[in-house]
């Protein structure tokens, strides 16, 4: 799911669903509940979310839309923790490890994908027996860590931002942690809520989770910037990992709406 798809969904809604379709599928990025609802409003049907990597398809939704069935006929999946130990269904792993059964020239055996994946402890009501992924929170690199209000460090999962930013009337949003601030980009912003209110709302929510954020910067942009691979992750961190050289972070572009400063 991405910015362009949301723009198409809005256009389809404006055209009273005159756009023909056979099936709506989303790939490559985390599909949020708000995005799913927008697509349903536009086309009248829920999208089929497909999960995969460059190296292999991994899973797809069935008609029940209650999770993604892993393609266990072509891959062997393992949900593991940071130490590589198996994680039971119902709990998030720190990595998904796959062994691909169909590659003939470049074997992939226990290939690590750093996605936070949770398998469903319940079988799907459709009757298919392939394992069901009931949630994908994105890459482990998308987990942001902040100084804690009461000391220590506080980890914020990427899914934390969806209920806060998803309902805002905008085509797309992105949260980027820079070394000295948290940058929020909103494209196609048409909400009654001002950028200042959005910044304050986020600041309050993060503090309620015990995270100390030095500064929240809200920016209205024409388009969410994409990576070299063409993706626009909802959440990412430009904070150097421990031991890596300190960089200056990514450049800020677009119209600066407002910001909130914290001591
Ligand atoms: Zn199913």
Image: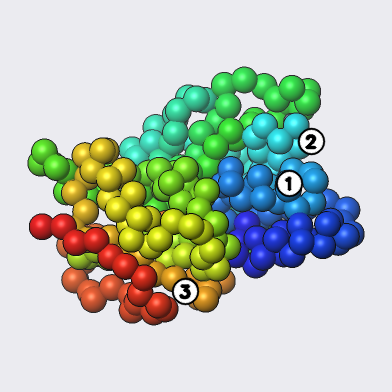
SS for tag 3? strand
SS for tag 1? helix
SS for tag 2? loop
> Considering depth in this image, is 57 or 181 the residue closer to the camera?
181
Q: Earlier in the sequence, mark 2 or mark 3?
A: 2
| Quadrant placement of the C terminus | bottom left
Q: In the rendered view, would you say 117 is above or below 250?
A: above
Residue 110 location, x and y as percent?
51, 45
Q: In the rendered view, would you say 245 is above or below 201?
A: below
Residue 35 location, x and y as percent?
61, 50
Q: Quadrant of residue 93?
A: top left
Res 231 label: none
> Considering depth in this image, is 165 or 109 the residue closer to the camera?
165
Say if residue 177 shows up in the picture. Answer: no
Tell me: 221 left or right of 103.
left
Q: Residues within 10 Å of mark 3 (few under 14, many from 20)?
A: many
Marks 1 and 3 close (CB-CB < 8 Å): no
Which numbered mark, 2 or 3, is in the foreground of this view? Answer: 3
Q: Which residue is mark 1?
A: 40
Q: Earlier in the sequence, mark 1 or mark 3?
A: 1
Q: Which residue is mark 2?
A: 63
Tell me: 94 left or right of 53.
left
Say if residue 65 shows up in the picture. Answer: yes
Q: In the rendered view, would you say 111 is above or below 80?
A: below
For ligand 1, tell me if the residue under mark 2 lies within 8 Å.
Answer: yes
Q: Quadrant of residue 6?
A: bottom right
Label 1 and label 3: CA atoms lie apart by: 26 Å
Q: Earlier in the sequence, mark 1 or mark 2?
A: 1
Label 1 and label 2: CA atoms lie apart by: 14 Å
Q: Which residue is mark 3?
A: 221
């Amino acid at each position: 799911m991405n910015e362009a798809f949301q723009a198409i969904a809005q256009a389809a809604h404006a055209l009273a669903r005159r756009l023909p379709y056979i099936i709506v599928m989303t790939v490559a990025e985390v599909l949020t509940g708000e995005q799913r609802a927008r697509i349903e409003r536009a086309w009248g049907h829920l999208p089929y979310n497909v999960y995969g990597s460059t190296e292999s398809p991994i899973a797809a939704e069935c008609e029940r839309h209650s999770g993604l069935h892993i393609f266990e006929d072509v891959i062997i999946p393992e949900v593991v923790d940071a130490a590589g130990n198996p994680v039971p269904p119902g709990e998030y792993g720190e990595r998904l490890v796959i062994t691909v059964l169909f590659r003939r020239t470049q074997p992939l055996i226990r290939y690590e994908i750093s996605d936070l994946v949770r398998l469903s402890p319940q079988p799907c009501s459709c009757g298919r027996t392939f394992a069901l992924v009931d949630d994908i929170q994105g890459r482990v690199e998308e987990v942001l860590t902040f100084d804690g209000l009461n000391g220590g460090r506080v980890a914020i999962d990427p899914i934390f931002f969806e209920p806060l930013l998803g309902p805002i009337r905008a085509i797309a949003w992105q949260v980027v942690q820079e070394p000295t601030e948290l940058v929020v980009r909103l494209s196609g912003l048409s909400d009654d809520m001002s950028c200042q209110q959005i910044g304050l709302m986020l600041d309050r929510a993060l503090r309620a989770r015990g995270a100390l954020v030095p500064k929240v910067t809200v920016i209205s942009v024409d388009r969410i910037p994409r990576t070299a691979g063409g993706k626009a992750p909802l959440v990412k961190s430009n904070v150097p990992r421990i031991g890596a050289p300190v960089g200056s972070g990514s450049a800020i572009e677009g119209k600066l709406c407002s910001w909130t400063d914290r001591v």
